Every structure is written in C-alpha cells, then in structure tokens.
Amino acid sequence: MIRLSLLARGQHHVQGRRCLLLSSASSFTSTHLLASRGSTFRSIPLSQDARAFSTSWRSFLPEKNSAGGNTAPADGERAKRPFRVAVIGSGPGGFYTAHRILKNVPEASIDMYEALPVPHGLVRFGVAPDHPEVKNVMHTFDEVAQNPNFTFIGNTSVGTYITPGSEKADLEISDLRAHYDAILLAYGAHEDRLLGVPNEQSLKGVMAARSFVGFYNGLPSEQGLEIDLSQSETAVVIGQGNVALDVARILLTPLEELRKTDLTEKMIKILERSRVKHVHVVGRRGPLEVAFTAKELREMLQLPDTTFHMDRDLLASEMERAGKTLERPRKRLMGLLEKGIKESKPDQPKSWSLLFLRSPLGFTGQNNQGQGQGQQLKTIELGINRLEGADSSQRAVATGEKESLDCGLAFRSIGYKSVGVQCVPFDERKGIVPNMDGKVVDADQNIVPGLYASGWLKRGPIGVIATTMADAYQTGDTIISDWVNGRPMLNGSSSHKEGGKPILELLHSKGHKTVSYEDWKKIEQKEIDLGAKAGKPREKFLTVEEMLKVLD
C-alpha cells in the first residue's frame, strides 16, 4: 500500500502513529460549544475506557493567536473561500450528510474517500437482494455525485484501524487535515460482535451473519468465506433483528425467486446444493423484545411451502402482562405473530421458528468435543432464561436449565461493531466515535474542532436507512452551523484550503489508481450488462481486480 507524506511542519510520530502534538491543550470544550450554539446538545456519557490515543486527537485543535485565543475566522472571511470537507466512507451516512451540506452551503466542496472502487456501502453490500426498493436510494446518491462541487475518490482507504495487525491505509487522517476545513467520519461498522462462548470461531458451519450477508452481496473482503449448505437440513440464527430474518429468508426462499435478484451467481450455485429446510431464529429474551420490523416478519410469514412455529402460550402471556402499556407499533407486530401462528399451514416441506428465552452456551463438533479447526458443527447448547425486572427494562436471567439443538449451520447475528482508526477518539466499549450531535469529543468531552461523525460510527449499528438519513442530516446541520457561525475548524486557520487536489496528485505520482464517480458508473454499467444476460438486475464483480479491470 502507498504511504504518503502530507504532514504539516511540526507533526511528529506518536507511538508509531503519525499525529501532530501540540504543547498545550485547548480550552475549547463542549461547554463552550453549548454556550455558543445557544441550544441544548445531547451529551453522550463516555466510559472510562474511551480511547483517545493519548494526545493524538490534539492534531485537530485550533492554533492559538498572539493573544492566546483560538484563531477562528469571521463569517465574512469564510464566505470568500470554499468550504473544504473530506468525507471518509461512501455509505448512507456519508452521502446524506454530503447532500445536506451541499444543499445549504453554496461554497461547500466535498471530497468523498472510499476504500473500495465502488460506492454506497451498506446499500450495496448489506441490503438484502430481494429488497430492490430499498436500494433505490442509490439514485439519490447519484444526484449528489452530479453536483460539480462533489468529488468521489474511490479505491483509496483512509485511516489505519487500531486493531492489531491491520493493514496500513493508503492515507491517514493526519494526511488530510492540512487540506480541509472539516473531516467527516462515516465509514460504518466492519466487524461483528462475538457471543463469547466455546468454539464459535473454530468449527465449520459457525459464522457471523454479517460475513454471510457480505458474501452473498458480493463484498470482496468476504469472498473467502467457506459456506457449505449441504451438510445439514437445520440452521440456527442467534439474534432476532432484521439481519437475522434476512439470513433465514435467503436460506428458505425458493431459488427461482432469488435468481431474479442481484444475488451473486457464486451464492446461487451454493444454494443449488443446499439441504437447509428448517431455520430456528433464537433470542435470549421474549417476543416483546424482538428487534425485527413488521415488514421483515411479514415477508417471513409469506414464504411459500413453509410452516411457522413459536410458543403461542408465551406470546399470549407476554401480551397479557404488557396490557395497555404496549405501544401501537409493538402491538401491531405482536398481532402479526398471532396471525402467523393461526394461519400457518402444518407439515410443509420447510419451516422456521422463533425460539425465545434461549442463550447460546457453546457449540459442539461432530466428535462431541468441538476442539480444533476443521470440525463440522453438530449441536448448539442453549441455556434457558426467564425474564426479570420492570416491564420497560426486563432482562434475561439464566435458570440453570439447558437444552441441545442439532444443527449443521449457525449464524451469530447479535450486532455489528465499528472499529477505531488511528489519531481519532474512540469508545471501544460502545463501539462508536464519541460525539455530541455528530461533533467529535475526546474522553474528557473536549470538542475536537473540525472532526465529525455520522451513521453507525456515530450512534452504533441500529436503525434502518431512514434512521441513518435523519442522523446524517443532524450531523450535517451541526457542520453547517459551525461553518456559518465562524466556529473553529481544522487547525483554526482562515487560510484557503486546497482540498483533494494535492492528495490526488501525489497518489497518482506514486502509481496509485483512484476511481472517480464516472469510473464507478462504467463499472456499474458493465455489471448491469452482465446481469441482463442472466435475467437479473446486475451481476456484481466480486474482487477489486475485476472492478478495476473494467477501467483498463
């Protein structure tokens, strides 16, 4: 990977990380921001283990003037020059924030950096293939990219992850700071949460739902995943959110229906050999606490030739316990479950079930020990729970009872997780960049001027795309307010910033191939052409090399 030297004079290495150190900290804290905005911020309480990498975040502090104050230019000075913003990540969080800024700040100029040659993040690699209507947001992103003040810089990673052994990025955050007024972090969540039980990472057939979703959606980094659906008729999904139901639905949907989607041909061939007929979706709490939406549930209940199972008595007792306190959306969801139980046809060739009050305790391989790489999953041990506490905050408590469930496939779907990058504050416990309305703060709640977060990196991996849009607009409004009101940005300097021009020049001089949005549309058109031959919307390229070859 290419390493650049765009650091401004005075920057130093810190514990092997390229970050600028200042001799003293800024007194510009979150309380100053609250006073200057004249409105109430939602303060995110930070844990003691929030990780700010020593003083590395101080590279974003405004410089002091001769009087000791922060050098923030007046409104008039800013209006005379472009507002240079770098966006790291090209998913919904990045695009919607860019859309908000470009719409409201005429002098804004945005460069969007993406590690892959193709944009759109979770929309391309996370949305289920049989949900094409959700992917229509890509048309909105295309409109944003047509703005003359927008530049897409694909095939260029920014920020080396803090995870030990992570591959060096093409650029570090510190490489950008001298060239922009603001940097928006919107690179999403790239890892999954572990169950923390024996053998979840050593047995064949046990995998992350995140990886499986990435695999069937064509994410290059997941194409090495070993998936064999011919080993067993039974699969288990741990978790009861939308992703869990996506996995179950892909496993049970008739293949002739999936062939019409943009599911990769590689996954189609695997499904052709599938023996999976029964899927259990397991949750540690009760039916009132499920995280999936009515839309996802309705699709599962409409699967052809598929019986639905769940504990009718548990559902009735939980609804009776909740009584009139049950909110309308939750009541509607429970009504769908009641209807599903009542209308489900018995003795169908396929089935799916919702299992409640169950927590995974461990996985066992075919030799009943489950130790060592390469063994095939045979059973999952589940602990039986009961619910305790007030209705609004019930928690699952182990009863000590256990049961075993035979299965050859298990998918953990208990949440995605963001990873921090060097020189940026990061709360490892919560898995987010600590922030207030999108404005990054450190462990002591000092504002980091000019640094912002959006999407899952800002609030955690929750919600749907519409949730991310609202969240991104909030961050966009925060950035706009800081700019038009003359608040400190990166370096606090009033000097003209060049944006990505010098960075692109250096990248190209080193032989690094960047991808423009025009280039991406060429890649996309080739995918569409290949898909048309198979009667589907597109056939995605599965490797970076295949994507770049289109541009040769």
Image (cartoon, rainbow, N blue to C red):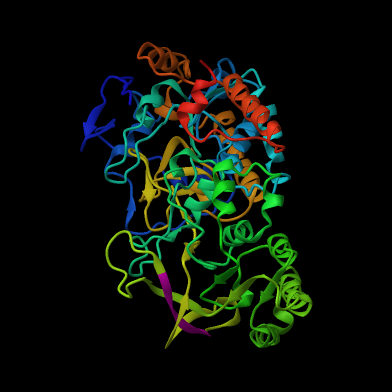
Residue 488 visible, this orientation: no
Is 379 inside the magenta-drawn segment?
yes
Residue 175 is situated, as x and y percent measured from the top left of the image, at 36, 25
- What type of secondary structure mainly makes up the magenta span? strand
Q: How many marks?
A: 0
> With 107 as the anchor, is 461 left or right in this view?
left
Q: Nearer the viewer, residue 254 or 430?
A: 254
Residue 508 is situated, as x and y percent measured from the top left of the image, at 41, 13
> With 537 as the anchor, is 98 left or right in this view?
left
Q: Residue at x 47, y 77 (%)?
A: 405
Residue 456 is situated, as x and y percent measured from the top left of the image, at 52, 48
Residue 398 visible, this orientation: yes
> For residue 492, what is the image quadrant?
top left
Q: Which residues are magenta?
A: 378-387
Compared with 543, 255 (above or below) is below
Q: Residue at x 59, y 29 (%)?
A: 484
Compared with 482, 234 (above or below) is below
Is 263 inside the magenta-drawn segment?
no
Residue 113 is situated, as x and y percent measured from the top left of the image, at 49, 28
Compared with 412, 215 (above or below) is above
Q: Residue at x 40, y 18 (%)?
A: 512
> For residue 332, what is the image quadrant?
bottom right
> With 135 as the anchor, is 7 left or right in this view?
left
Q: Quadrant of the N terminus?
A: top left
> With 156 as the anchor, is 98 left or right in this view?
right
